[in-house]
Structure formats: structure tokens, C-alpha cells
Image (tube, helix red, strand yellow):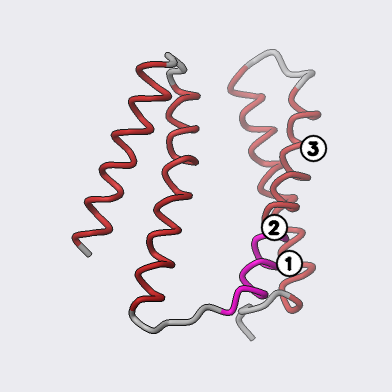
Amino acid sequence: MHIESLASAVFVLAFGSAFVLWMGLGAEGIAWMNLATSVPTCWLYVHLAGRCGVELNWRPIGSSFAFAALTAGLAGAAAHAASSPWANPWLRLLVVGTLFASIVAAFYGAFWTRLPYAAR
């Protein structure tokens, strides 16, 4: 537990400094920091679990990841296309957020029983 917390703090400090301070990306830098921090942290969790004798079945994990990435990509593209006619930022956020959530919910609703590890 302490190794994971320490490593996460180091990753956040390193990537946060790189993206927010040195590159000056601001809020976008925080998003990139979160993404860049999650990759080595996930690798650390997998490595530590492997050292404890836990073997992961990567096929269902990979297929679930691919489904989530495809769903989020399609929902994001549709939401981005729907955001252009709205000038008011709050109205645009309401429309885009609702559309994104609706598309994700529809995809998961349609394919829930075919997903690995889905509640049965």
C-alpha cells in the first residue's frame, strides 16, 4: 500500500511538473498528467500483483478496454459534432454531456450481456 501511494505521488509530481509548470498547459496539462500518471501506476499494480502470485487473464481485460475505448471515442466524436451550434457554454455543456452519457449508456445497455465480467 505504501509503495503504491509513494509511487503515485512521485508520478503526479513528475508529470504534473512537466505538463503544467514546464509546458504551461494549465487545465489541459492536468488532464495529460492524469493520463500519463495512470499508465505507470497501472503497470506497478500489475507488477506487484504478479509478484504476489496473481495471474491476470488479459484477453477479457483487453476486450473490455477496447470496448470502452471504442464507445468513448464514438460518444466523444458525436458529442463534439453536436457542440458546434451552441454559443452558450452552459447550454453546450448540458447538451454535450447528456449526449455523451446517453450514447455510453446505450452501448453498455445493448452489449452488457456480451461483455466479459458483466453481472449476470
Q: Quarter holding the C terminus?
A: bottom right
Total count of labels: 3
- Please, is residue 16 above or below residue 49 in the view? above
Q: Can you say whether 81 is above or below 48 in the image? A: above
Asked if labels 2 and 3 touch by Cβ distance under 8 angstroms, the answer is no
In this picture, residue 54 sits left or right of residue 59: left
Circle 3 SS class: helix
* Relative side of 18 to 93, left or right: left
Helix, strand or loop at label 2? It is helix
Mark drawn on residue 109: 1
Residue under the point 33% across and 42% down: 11
| Front residue of 61 and 119 | 61
Amino acid bearing label 2: Ala
Start-end of magenta stretch: 57-67
Q: Are marks 2 and 1 in contact (CB under 8 Å)?
A: yes
The residue carrying mark 2 is 105
Rate crowding at label 1 as few (under 14), some (14 to 19) or many (20 or more) other CA atoms within 10 Å.
few
